[in-house]
Amino acid sequence: MDGNGRWAKKRFLPRFAGHKAGVDAVRNVTRAARAMGIEALTLYAFSSENWRRPAEEVSDLMGLLRHFIRSDLDELTRENVRLRVIGDYHAFSPDLVAMVDDAIARTAANTGPLLAIALNYGAHAELVLAARRLAERARDGVLDPASIDA
């Protein structure tokens, strides 16, 4: 979902209009993927680098996520879609974390397509987290560092 701001700027619209169009695109892509029988779809919705944006824009993005969950969760449930989140969304406000947790729980038993949404996700952050986990396992004697290979 990268480029929403550039899309809006090209059309002389505010950045928020681009982000809103991005949410509409998510709906369309998700529906099309289901119709085509695609079993898993991953959408990158909010990277860990997005925190560097102006506070108002971050707030708008969080509002759009809230709106998406409120307006689309029933359809995802009805269509048997399983929702998963990758990334550390627990850095969001407590009310939004609760909404995401509820959405995941409400779709957990669904057996249809998987919709994975990357929230507060970034490759650098994932590498740091993986390195920390490996270091902890080595420290605890659970992992032999010599067993790590490419």
Image: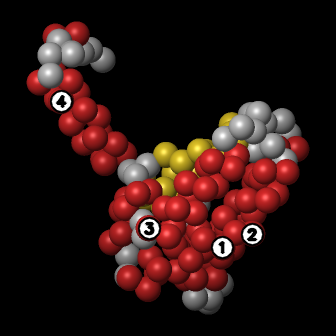
* Residue 108 at x, y percent in the picture: 66, 41
- Cα separation between marks 1 and 4: 38 Å
In the picture, measured across the screen, residue 130 lies left or right of residue 104, that is: left
Q: Which quadrant is the C terminus positioned in?
A: top left
Tag 4: amino acid:
Glu
* Crowd around label 4: few <14 · some 14–19 · many ≥20 (10 Å): few
In the picture, measured across the screen, residue 146 lies left or right of residue 29, that is: left
* Residue to which mark 3 is pinned: 94
Q: Which is nearer the N-term, disc 3 or disc 1?
A: 1
* Residue to which mark 4 is pinned: 136
Who's the residue at 15% across and 16% down the image? 141
Looking at the image, do the residues carrying marks 3 and 1 touch, with CB atoms under 8 Å apart? no
Who's the residue at 49% across and 46% down the image? 86
- Cα separation between marks 2 and 1: 6 Å
Looking at the image, do the residues carrying marks 2 and 1 touch, with CB atoms under 8 Å apart? yes
In the picture, measured across the screen, residue 46 lies left or right of residue 91, that is: right
* Residue to which mark 1 is pinned: 67
* Residue 15 at x, y percent in the picture: 55, 82
- Figure check: 61 above or below 49: below
Q: Which is nearer the N-term, disc 3 or disc 2?
A: 2
